[in-house]
Amino acid sequence: MTKAEIVEQIYERVGFSKKEAAELVEKVFDVIKETLARGEKVKISGFGNFVVRHKNARKGRNPQTGQEILLEARKVLTFKPSLVLKNVLNEEPAEVESPPPPQ
């Protein structure tokens, strides 16, 4: 799904104008990008977590030449889906997480 398709879905489902829907989608993505750029986690209940992780520098190998190279340290974005999203993807009914029984 593309950003334009998301805008179209918002336009159809919410009733905003296409311009308003596009602005809304842009604002949401801007907030997510800014939050991740600060190194903070983005948790969307019922959907999942976006987390920026740091990967240390390490030795790698050029697969074409076999030459050893140094891969620099970098940040990577990871996503962990929520249980609700996993169940939707697997067509299982969503489970409500209950606290563990008292001991």
Image (cartoon, rainbow, N blue to C red):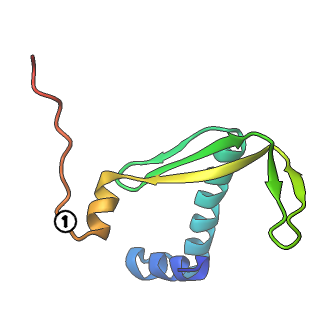
The answer to which image quadrant residue 27 occupies is: bottom right
- Front one among 78 and 65: 65
Residue 14, image x and y in percent? 40, 73
Q: Residue at x 18, y 31 (%)?
A: 99
Q: Residue at x 88, y 55 (%)?
A: 68
Q: Residue at x 75, y 39 (%)?
A: 56
Q: Amino acid at mark 1?
A: Glu
- Front one among 58 and 23: 58
Relative to 66, is 15 above or below?
A: below
Q: Residue furthest front?
A: 66
Q: Residues within 10 Å of mark 1 (few under 14, many from 20)?
A: few
Relative to 93, is 72 above or below?
A: above
Q: How many marks?
A: 1
Relative to 68, is 73 above or below?
A: above
Residue under label 1: 92
Relative to 78, is 10 above or below?
A: below
Element at label 1: loop
The answer to which image quadrant residue 2 occupies is: bottom right
Residue 101, image x and y in percent? 10, 26
Residue 63, image x and y in percent? 80, 69
User: Which quarter shows the C terminus?
Assistant: top left
Q: Residue at x 31, y 52 (%)?
A: 83
